[in-house]
Amino acid sequence: MNHAAVSWWQEGILYQIYPRSFQDSNADGIGDLPGITRRLLYLRDLGVDAIWLSPIFPSPMADFGYDISNYLGVDPIFGTLDDFDTLVAAAHASNLKVILDLVPNHTSDQHSWFIESRSSRDNQKRDWYLWREPRADGAAPNNWMSEFGGSAWSYDAGTKQYYYHAFLAQQPDLNWRNPAVRQAIYDVMRFWFRKGVDGFRVDVLWHLIKDAEFRDNPPNPSFRLGRPPHEALLPLYSTDRPEILEVVTEMRRVVDEFSDRVLIGEIYLPVDRLVAYYGKDLSGAHLPFNFALLSVPWNARAIAKLIDDYERALPAAAWPNWVLGNHDRPRVASRVGQAQARVAAMLLLTLRGTPTLYYGDELGMQQVAIALDQVRDPFEKNVPGIGVGRDGCRTPMQWNGDAHGGFTTGEPWLPLANEYAHQNVANLSADTRSVLNLYR
């Protein structure tokens, strides 16, 4: 490995944009690609080096784009492929890299692959998904749970088998033991790389391979009520199987067919398992996302221990990374308070390694309380009342004090924070001591 050259993803700062909520350009209340293009100057001025976009592909939006019906297009809500090309060209001209969200674990049940797969037991794409016989009594093949509540198996009356879905029933899991599936996804990656994309953040990377024998998951002895129901089982056989590292290495080879691109993995695992995803001799993900700061008790000793443990666990020459917020977790300013949010920013931006920040955290944006009739998140709808809803961290970006914070002239898809009238880019830019200027 060449240690002399430092890659852009080692010295850069990554900025996650949730496209629905960043900037609307056509008054439909939903952010879009032309809106992001319009705000590139802000991002340059902020000082970030790469933008990572949550999924923009065609989707029925059962899980807001994490249920993809076509990997090779752009959902009309967000614009067109031409709008995407315009964004990439403008970003590159502004010295910003563009990272896409790849969702290879599952597709939408509306994807042509799944429509074919479920059409008959002998369809050539049957084995592209995980189909199993019912048990003798007709029950699901095993006890695996969906992360969004209930069994992870749905029965298909047409072909009299169950299919597996780690998330919604509308998100059937692909069979990553099938080489044809792997090649199809690798071709998707090549398609976007040829369009100038600088890398991928791979969704739920640790889920891709499941136990070949589909054994029951064991009970979780430390499960407590008030937690999401799927946590009652340890996902021993449904996630983080040893064969996954072979897949990560293959994926990295595809990335390496193109120059200077990055492979980032979404992986919620303990540090000792997380670092395995760097791969043997660093042949895996460049950056297996380190989410430890999202759940650590917010005190100096706990954080110091976490940093030491992570640094110690890193393979030789592996590059560290840190994340403070994302589209699935409560906002950092609400988690630790506004004063500590400044401390958190200092920590994120001075620790060794690549920082990833979540849009709006530079404004100290808060977790927004969502009224029952405004809930959009399927997780909250399926598992209500225990605080798993993700809408509160996905609210529109607060640009100025105008109606809807300058995000849209229409009716926003989620409500804005009450604080937006004073806590916005225009106001905070003018205040030299603001959290925004601290980030800058």
Image (cartoon, rainbow, N blue to C red):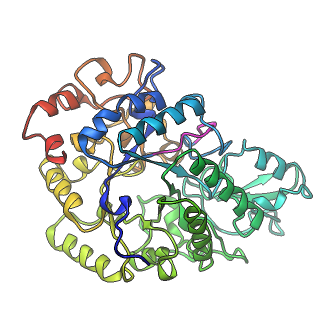
Residue toward you, 377 or 17: 17
Left or right, 13 with reference to 138: left
In the rendered image, the vertical position of residue 299 relative to residue 279, given as above or below = above
Q: Quadrant of the N terminus?
A: bottom left
Residue 303, position in %: x, y?
21, 70
Instruction: Choose top left, top right, bottom left or bottom right for residue 61.
Output: top right
Residue toward you, 3 or 381: 3
Q: Quadrant of the C terminus?
A: top left
Majority secondary structure of the magenta segment?
loop
Residue 220, position in %: x, y?
49, 74
Residue 48, position in %: x, y?
30, 47
In the rendered image, the vertical position of residue 227 relative to residue 213, given as above or below = above
* Residues shaded magenta: 53-62
Q: Residue at x 7, y 37 (%)?
A: 432
Query: Any magenta on residue 29?
Result: no
Left or right, 213 with reference to 229: right
Instruction: Choose top left, top right, bottom left or bottom right for residue 96.
Output: top left
Q: Residue at x 44, y 66 (%)?
A: 268
In the rendered image, the vertical position of residue 242 relative to residue 53, given as above or below = below
Can residue 44 be seen by looking at this rendering? yes
Can residue 424 be seen by looking at this rendering? no
Q: Residue at x 11, y 40 (%)?
A: 434
Residue 162, position in %: x, y?
78, 58
Tally of numbered tags: 0
Residue toward you, 11 or 219: 11
Q: Residue at x 25, y 52 (%)?
A: 335
Query: Any magenta on residue 56?
Result: yes
